Image (tube, rainbow, N blue to C red):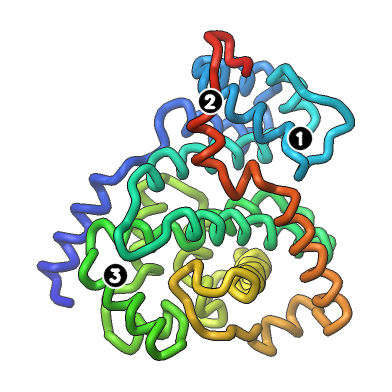
Amino acid sequence: MNDKDIKALTKKINELPTPDFIVQRIIDLANDPEANINDLHNMIVQSPALTAKILRLVNSAYYALPKRVTKLSQAINLLGFKTVRNLALSIFTVENYFSEDIPFFNTQHFWVHLISTGLASELLARYLNFPDKEEVFMCGVLHDLSKVVMAHIMPDVFEMIIKVAQHEKISFFQAENLLSTYSHQQIGRKLFENWNMSELVIETATYHDNPLESQDEEAKKILYIVNVGNITTNLYFYGYSGSFDIPEVDLKVWNFLGLNYNKYSSYFEEFKDIIKRSPEFTNMREIFDDLEVTSDGSV
């Protein structure tokens, strides 16, 4: 691909939706140690629809809260700033990047892949006693979003990659390499730079399929965790991400994270259980379509 083509693609990426003012402020407040619950609450309630959707997800079986949460302040207090940020980002992503179907690609299945990778990565972080579980979840959900972007800005190339991956029984990443095309990981870097996302998100989007090539030591553990979460989701939801191989965790990643057969087996069984009890996440678009929102954000 020549410089002219790359500039044209970059222009198209620059025209894509970025987090609106409210979502961007939620991200900023979640990263601000000086912010308090009132700051975050007062920002979110400016959007009754966003408030209602966050409350719907907070009350899902995934969080298993002892009683129903009806107030946003309760949700923030119980789950924390970064979890609420992740919910707001997930809602933004679904509404802005999954509103249209793609003829040759099942977007509902692909959303299942994204959110499941977030859940799988967060669960693995818990198994490894890694403290930044919320960052891992966010990186997991966003890691492959650029494939949807590619489907819209490079539809012919995207369709060819899917067909090659399916025919050859290889991963999307391997099919890209076989065709020597501009990759979804390169698109992901540009997309999340436009979103002003953290280096953790950008690095994960850029190297989740080839994590050993990353030179960022600070992002290394999160990157490796998301890599395993992604592989786990591809094993469970074969083909949902446009990958049709049987993936394996690189031995260096496996050893770095201190994994073994028994630990991974227990983790995989718990991951399957989490997916079964998380329909609000996996069917997010359908649930939001049916949601009736009042002016104060209650449902």
Task: Give the mark nearer the N terminus: 3 vs 1.
Answer: 1
Camera-near label (3 vs 1) is 3
Residue 80, compared with residue 151, is above or below; it is above
Instruction: Give the foreground label among 2 and 1.
Output: 2
Circle 1: residue type: Leu
Three-letter amino acid code at disc 2?
Answer: Leu
Instruction: Answer yes or no: is residue 217 visible.
Output: no
N-term-proximal mark, 3 vs 2: 2
For marks 3 and 2, give the CA distance: 32 Å
> Helix or strand or loop: what does disc 2 sit on?
helix
The residue carrying pointer 2 sits among few (fewer than 14), some (14 to 19) or many (20 or more) residues within 10 Å by Cα, namely many
Q: Residue 50: which numbered mark, if any?
A: 2
Count up the numbered dots.
3
Among the two numbered marks 2 and 1 on one chain, the one whose residue lies closer to the N terminus? 2
Q: Is residue 199 left or right of residue 258?
A: left
Task: Measure how far apart labels 2 and 1 are at the Cα level.
Answer: 16 Å
Local SS, label 3: helix
Which residue is drawn at the image coordinates 23% and 45% (left, top)?
A: 15
Which residue is denoted by mark 1 in the rendering? 79
Q: Along the line of sight, which residue is nearer the eye, 65 or 137?
A: 65
Question: Residue, x 72% and y 27% (percent of image)?
Answer: 76
Identify the mark at residue 158; answer none if there is no mark.
3
The part of the image, by quadrant, that contains residue 140 is: bottom right
Asked whether residue 259 appears in the rendered view, the answer is: yes
Residue 252 % position (x, y): 68, 87
